[in-house]
Image (cartoon, rainbow, N blue to C red):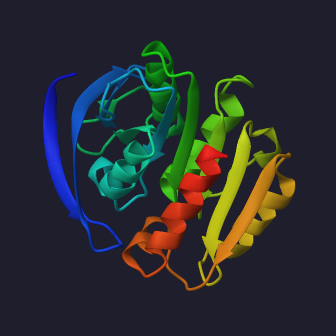
Amino acid sequence: MKRLLMLGVVLASGLAASAEFSEVSFDSEDGGRVFANLYGKVYGKGEHAVVLAHGGVFNKESWHAQAVALEARGVQALAIDFRGYGKSGGGKRSKDLYLDVLAAVDYLKAKGASRISILGGSMGGGAVAQAATAVDEDDVHKVVLLAHVPISAPKKMKGDKLFIVTEGDRFAESTRSQFKKAAEPKRLEVLPGNAHAQHIFKTPQAGPLTDLILDFLED
């Protein structure tokens, strides 16, 4: 862990939120270096930890409010920057973003997390979905896909899966298709509106969406 930081935001409730986090880094299997923000009062020793994977126009800082909400429920959060974002980079397989998610899972396992879940939006959701096909059966507890970029073999995804999309999202049809092909256990939630992936957190749906995700992860 390189440093402790504090960042403040305003949650959907209107209350200011601030939480310390530690910037950490770790290697991917193809030689990349992933930087991430780790939230939790006892860094690396939480029972349940969640990897947060951002969309194409976002970064690891974009998950701050959700990471604070997770920490408030006693869940650690590890928000990563994908290769090519922030200080993350390298790796021989530059397009295989899912390797960064797998590296985050391995990092949390090495730090003692007993349950690990993975959550991603849009581009990051596609990486999370692909990572869920590559992990061992017991490596991932819950998988949350927020209007994710579709993958070729959704039926191979492990874990208890929650698919989320707004009814007017351009990925609504592909999300339904991916959901149908995925193995049980699985759940699909279609929200009102047309905001895409993490952009939903900028709308009045932010509170209900956050509660939906937190309740699913705790179930």
- Visible in this render: residue 152? yes
Front-most of residues 137 and 156: 137
The residue drawn where x is 33% and y is 57% is 65
Q: Would you place residue 56 above or below residue 197 in this image?
A: above
Quadrant for the N terminus in the image: top left
In the image, residue 153 above or below residue 47: below
Q: Residue at x 47, y 25 (%)?
A: 103
Residue drawn at (49%, 77%) of the image: 205
The total number of labels drawn is: 0
Vertical position of residue 47 compared to residue 175: above or below: above
Q: Position of residue 151 (x, y in %)?
A: 68, 50
Q: Image height check: is 18 above or below 135?
A: below
Residue at left 53%, top 67%?
209
Viewer-closest of 76 and 123 = 76
- Asked which quadrant contains residue 21, the reply is top left
Residue 40, position in %: x, y? 33, 34
In the depicted view, which residue is nearer to us: 41 or 140? 41
Taking the image as drawn, is residue 171 in sight? no
213 vs 80, nearest the viewer: 213
